[in-house]
Every structure is written in C-alpha cells, then in structure tokens.
Amino acid sequence: MNKSSKIDLEKRLAYLEQANRFKMMALDLTKELEEFHSSINKLEDPSVIFEKCRDRAVKIIGFKQMAFLLVNEGDSDFHIYRCYPETDKEQIEKELSIFIEDGTFSRAVLEKKTVIAYSKDFNHQLLLHALATSSRVRGMFVGVLEKNTKHIEEAAIEILSILMVHCANAIESFELYYRLKESNITLEEKLKLLSISEACLKDEIKDHKKTEAALESSEKQYRQLAETAKEIIITISEEGQIIYSNESAIKISGYSKQVMMKKGINEVIENFDDIMEDHYKSNADTHPAVLLSKIGDKISLEINIKSISNDDAPVEILIVGRDISERLEAEKGKKYLEGKLWQAHKMESIGLLAGGIAHDFNNILGIISSYTELSLLELPKDSEVYNYLTQIQKASNRASDLARKLHTIGKKDDHKKNIIDIKATINETIDLLKSSMGDDIEIKTKLVDKGLNVLGEETRIQQILMNLITNAVYAIAKEDGIILVSACKIDFHDGKLPLSLDLKPGSYIKLSVKDDGPGIDPAIIQRVFDPYFSTKRGKSNSGLGLSVVHGIVKNYNGAVEVDTQIGKGTSFHIYLPEAEL
C-alpha cells in the first residue's frame, strides 16, 4: 500500500468514525426528546425546554453564546426569551437588528433551515434557525460560534435542525397543554352553569349560529374589499349611513374611525344623492365626485358604485374611489403650458412679421423722407406746397418712429448694453412723466436701497417704464388714483421657479407697476401684448406700447407677468436678469 492510499484510508476511517458519532448522537437525542415530551405536562415554565435544548446544542456544535427568541402573539414581533449567558443579551440584540435590516433574519424565518452569517465586525459567525412547527413559526434560535470555527459538519447541522424542530414542538405542546388545562377549567364552569339552566345554553347556541352567519357575511365582504385595498373603500346602507370605511378613506378624509361611522355619506362625498341618481339613470362605470375632508379640503375622486346583496341581509352599497387630484392638476398644468407655448409661438410669428414689415416700410419711408427734404430745399418757406411737404415730413417721422417700434418687436436688439441702476432710471422717468399726468393721479415708489442693477440700455428701460405708467394712467382715467412703482431683487432656483415664467434659474430684478383702476377683462387678457390691440381711443394711440415692452423684455432674456382683478386694479411685473458688478 502506497503512502497516498494510506492517507485516503485514514481519512475514510475518520469520516466513518465521525458519521458514527453523529448517528449515536442523533439516537441519544431522539431518545432524550421522547422522554422529555412525555413529561412536558409536568412543566410549570417553558424555560426548562430552552435549557435542555441549550445543553444539547452545545454538545452538537460548540457555541459560545446562545439566545432563544419567541414570537409575541400580540404584535407578531420576535423578542429574546432566554439568552445564555444573560449578560450578552444586548450584544446579540444589536447583531439581530443588523440581520433584520439586511434580510438575513427574514430568510431564516422563510427557509426554516440553518442560516449562517458573519457578525458586523466579521470576527464571529452566527447561526440562525427558525423554531417552526408544521403549523407556524414559534421563534428563532441564535448561536454565536467560537471565533476559530472554520467548518461545521453537515451532519451536525442536520442534528441541530432536528433539535430545533423538537424544541418548537415542545413549546407548542407546552402551550397547548396549558391552553387545554385552562379550557378544561372553563368547561367545568360551563358544565356547572349548564346544570343550572339548559335554556341559557340553547340561547347561546342560537347566538353562536348568528355570530357564525355574521362572520361568513363579513368574510365575503372583506374578500371583495381586499381586491382594491389601496383604493378608498366605503360601504353604506340603503339609507346612506356609513357602515364601513377602509384606512385609505380614513387617512384622506382626516376623520377617525369612530367619527366616520357616525356620518352619512352626503357629509363625506359631496352631492352623493345626485351621483346615485345619475348612476341609476346612466348605468356608468365611473363617476366624478368630491370628498369633503375634516379640514375643509375638497378632494377630487373618481368612484365606482356597486350594490351588495347578502341573502336576507339588507342591501348595501360599495363605493370604491381613487384620488385623482394629482391627475387633474397635471392636466391643468399641461393645458396651461400648451396655452403658454401657443402664446410664445404667436408672439414669435408676430415678431418675425413685424420685423420684416418694419424693414421694408423703413426703406420706403427713407425714399419719401429724402425726396421731401430735397423738395423743401427747392421751395420758398412761404409757399403753400412747402407747407404740404412739411406735413408729409412730419408724417414720415411718425411713421419712422412706428417702424422703429415694429423693429423692436420683431428683431433681436443688438444695441450696446451697460450696467444700469434701475432705481435711478425709475426716479428719472417718473419726474419726466409727472408734469403730463395731472394732479388727480399720484405716483408712489417702493424701492430697495441698492442692488437693483440690470444689463441693458437706459432708453429701453425708460421706454418700458413710460409705456407701463402711461397705460396705468389711462386705466385710472379721470378718477383719482394711485400708481405704485416698485422694484426688488428676487431669486429663482430650480425648485421655486414659477411655472408661468419662462425663465432660467438665477437672480432677477422684479420691476412692478400697479394701478388701482378697474382691472382688465379676462376675455382680452391673452391679447394685451398683441401689436395694434388696444382698448384706448384716439389718434395718438398706436396699440404697440405693451408689444414693445414685451419685445424689449424678451430681448433681455426676461419675462412679463400680468396680475389683474376686476374692480381692484392691474399689476404688470417685469423680470430682468440681475447684472453682476
């Protein structure tokens, strides 16, 4: 026999000896457990069961720490019932909390077999095995292996599994025995009562049958409700009294369970009687509805209605609803954005058209103006034709000014831009306009002390102010009124950027002109920036003021916002990017 064969033979003998040892251990365990089960009715405390299992587990696998956990019947949670040694309970609890978080504990519960995992610091291995009977999981065994443990024989794990099954069965047997013992005591008491009054027992049997019927009806109802557990579910009587509401309905309404059960359906769902009438007439699957919450909110719902018949029981009505507030808000936002996009496209198209017309119109005006000037040079000033040509020249100048306004609307303004202190520009423009406004209208200002700097041309900013203030004066008309001009710095970030403003995140100067006039009719609010649209009357009005404002602001990468209320006035808000010094 060579050396290799000799080594293989030694390994084989060692394996057979170990297998034989484990078999003997298993036989001893089986015998001991059978004896233990036969005496379980003599136990007063389940601690003896765990002590026996601890002693046997140490013989099977060398654990330095062990803990037995039991399932709490009240909350179905696991808690340590016995820990060996007791001083290591806190350490094992910490390790278990990690296993609960990473799913190792759940895996051990579900698989009902040995699960081995490392401790948090990887210095030890922990063995977990569910204490499970054929009916349910009773608890969990946790064993901390010695630090130098490298490998656990499969036979040892199998024997440990047998031990854990017997441990779980012993716990269940112990519990059943004591429940049976308590039941026997109760039964004896009932037998005594039975001997006193047989008639009472008959009444109890009748009540029991009613309870069983009610339970069957309840099970059928809750099976139907379980199909849509995430929805708002309310059951009402034919009279409209709420008799059931699920957690979703309680949560969204804000009422407690007790309060909800005392309410009629019309107190919770607005105009429900009308919805039911429509349901019977149209036989529609879904209906729009509004839920009235405790704090007064009106929550949009989409509900399904179904009648429930239970043999002799009264007919009930099942209401299944979905909160569609977010969907409606999204549709509203989509519609608003579509409107804004249409308005932007319209203004862009108008701008391109206006720019093209202004260019061609200005070329023609140049010819008219040039020939008019040449003709004036050839005529005496007292000539009647000279006077006619002078009127033509004035009209040409007005038309040229009109062309410049159209050019401002239709083409990107490439003029030189400087950093402007908008506060000084506001004060200067107001001083310029005060003389032409009269004494009936007062202009007030509300400006911060500093930091109102924008990049642009001062004449363009003045043009914005003059157009807005002139419009405000016209809105107030001949009545006494107040115009408030204000300016401040405002920061827009990604999360705070208003949907109505087509702006990039950043810092802006907000310029506002507010009047206390009659406000703008909602029917025309979308047209106020259209060229040549105006509610003013008179030869001096071109209908381009707000169009020019819109064009200048857009060229400066800003935005215009209108806020108006009938009878209370109108505010125009201009947002211009802040210039850094």
Image: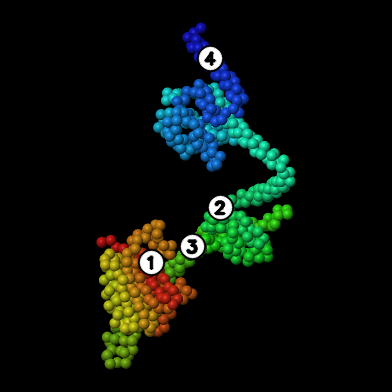
- Residue 458, image quadrant: bottom left
Query: Spatial distance from mark 2 to mark 3, Cα to Cα?
Result: 30 Å
Q: Is residue 117 above or below residue 503?
A: above
Residue 354's x, y, as percent? 41, 72
Q: Which residue is mark 1?
A: 559
Q: Tell me residue 387's x, y (percent).
A: 31, 90
Q: Nearer the viewer, residue 401 or 183?
A: 183
Q: Earlier in the sequence, mark 2 or mark 3?
A: 2
Q: Are marks 3 and 1 in contact (CB under 8 Å)?
A: no
Q: CA distance from mark 1 to mark 4?
A: 90 Å
Circle 2 or circle 1, nearest the eye: 2
Q: Residue at x 55, y 19 (%)?
A: 25
Badges 1 and 4: C-beta atoms under 8 Å apart? no
Q: In which quadrant is the C terminus drawn?
A: bottom left
Earlier sequence position, callout 4 versus callout 2 = 4
Sequence-first tag of 3 and 1: 3
Q: Position of residue 273 (x, y in %)?
A: 63, 65
Residue, far front:
196
Q: Nearer the viewer, residue 110 or 189?
A: 189
User: Around disc 4, counting alpha carbons within 10 Å, would you say few (fewer than 14), some (14 to 19), or many (20 or more)?
Assistant: few
Q: Quadrant of residue 549?
A: bottom left
Where is mark 4, residue-wise? 17
Q: Which residue is mark 2?
A: 247
Picture residue at 63% right of the left edge, 34% below the top: 181
Q: Nearer the viewer, mark 3 or mark 4?
A: 4
Q: CA distance from mark 3 to mark 4?
A: 79 Å
In the rendered structure, find residue 333 and report the number of the disc placed on it.
3
Judged from the image, the secondary structure of the residue bearing numbered disc 3 is helix
